[in-house]
Image: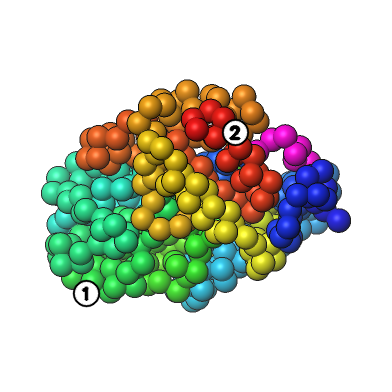
Amino acid sequence: MLFHREEEKTTDAVPTKGTGFDYLSANDIYFDSACQSLRPREVMTAMSDYYTKYNSCGERVKYKWGLEVDKHVDETREELLKLLKCSPKKYFASFTQNTTYGLNLILSQLKPDGIEHVVTSDIEHNSVFLSTLSLAKRLNVPRTVLTRNDDGSVNTDEIPANSVVVLNAVSNIDGRQLKDINNVAGAVHRSGGIFIIDAAQAMAYYHSLVAGVDFDALCLSSHKMYGPSLGAMVVKKSLLDRMSLTFLGGGMVDDVQKDSYILSAKNEEHIHTALEPGLQPYAEIIGLGAAIKWMKKAEKDNHILDYSGQLIDFLRNGEGFHVLNHENTTTIAFYNDKFDAHLLAEALSDAGIMTRSGHFCAHYYLAHVKKYPPLVRLSLGLHNRQSDINKFIEVMEKVAG
Ligand SMILES: Cc1ncc(COP(=O)(O)O)c(C=O)c1O
């Protein structure tokens, strides 16, 4: 059995299946999965297999270790496209450092032609908020910040023609989802625009929301979906026609002359190299492949929304607590009238409970639109147990009851 946290034997009525967190102590209660999920043992094993059995580079060598790397890296690209229901005829997957790098890599290389507007929303993470600010400035076009409705939707008639629209599919504040995402994609494309999804918070539990959507690009962070620290972009091949590749380097070219070069991406088979300058983090890419396989098994029978529902009910009934969530999601944000969020987080930490406090890289919305004080955020993962919820409630009753 992979899971042997002590409490499991006694207190958990409904243990989550498919766990790989045998290294986790019962006294460590981690509620910061929206930042980084814990890594299952299988992911670490896949990475250490790379280091100990075939540590070499990919796509450049003819020796057997390198060919093994190519096989596993190709598998991760395929797993990613499959998970997102993207046809390899239309899309490719490239790797990068994280969601932030992916967004910036794409936005900073878009040609100005035909782009008249940049659009985002008020509940975006700074990585979208700032990269769209930078894009609008570079292209010298107006930027609109849409107000997301309480249910996470946007009013598509507020999207101007020929816009680059960048929106999160799931918010890192309160887990709000862009439920009308297919309508948004349709509206953006009908009006000549480009639709880019920030899927950083969507991949771990809500990937079906973005799967099969007609996006032009989607950026994600492997470290928020049980994989190693890594980013990936899933990009429509036709988007490359609207990009001028300026971030260049090794691994991207078939030939180089004094003042010119031939991009390898011109060959369909190597199209992913358009966004992969330099040597890639092969162990991490292989780890992401293992994480996707693990996730597909582990998510089948989990109780994560039962747990978050219990936390939300508890907080809503507590004196002076304000919960931001409009619905039950795996990410919960709250504040208390009497207790400072950072002090609360410290008190929880003293009891082994790890939460986030502050404005979670969403300063514009939380600090300036809503003018909220610093908040506490609980973000759950597939490693969490019923006993983690019980302990949180017990400690909060003591600390702020
Ligand atoms: C919704 C959202 N978008 C983008 C990001 C940026 O992710 P990264 O820091 O991995 O680039 C985050 C990180 O928390 C996020 O929650």
Residue in the picture at 45% in, 67% down: 209
Q: Residue 112: x percent and y percent?
A: 21, 54
Q: Amino acid at mark 1?
A: Arg
Residue in the picture at 13% in, 49% down: 142
Q: Residue 161: x percent and y percent?
A: 15, 65
Q: Mark 2: is the Cβ under 8 angstroms from ligand 1? A: no
Magenta stretch in the rendered image: 22-29
Q: Is residue 312 visible?
A: yes
Disc on res. 190: 1
Task: Give the residue number, with chain letter if any, for mark 2.
Answer: 395
Q: Nearer the viewer, residue 323 or 112?
A: 323
Q: Quadrant of residue 239?
A: bottom left
Q: Main secondary structure of the magenta part?
A: loop
Q: Residues within 10 Å of mark 1 (few under 14, many from 20)?
A: few
Q: Amino acid at mark 2?
A: Val
287 is higher (above) or lower (below) than 238: above
Query: Is residue 227 located in the magenta-colored stretch of the structure?
Result: no
In terms of sequence position, does the residue under pointer 1 or pointer 2 come before the other?
1
Q: What residue occupies the far right of the structure in this picture?
A: 1
Query: Is residue 23 located in the magenta-colored stretch of the structure?
Result: yes
Residue in the picture at 26% in, 55% down: 148
Q: Nearer the viewer, residue 81 or 330?
A: 330
Of badges 1 and 2, the one in the foreground is 2
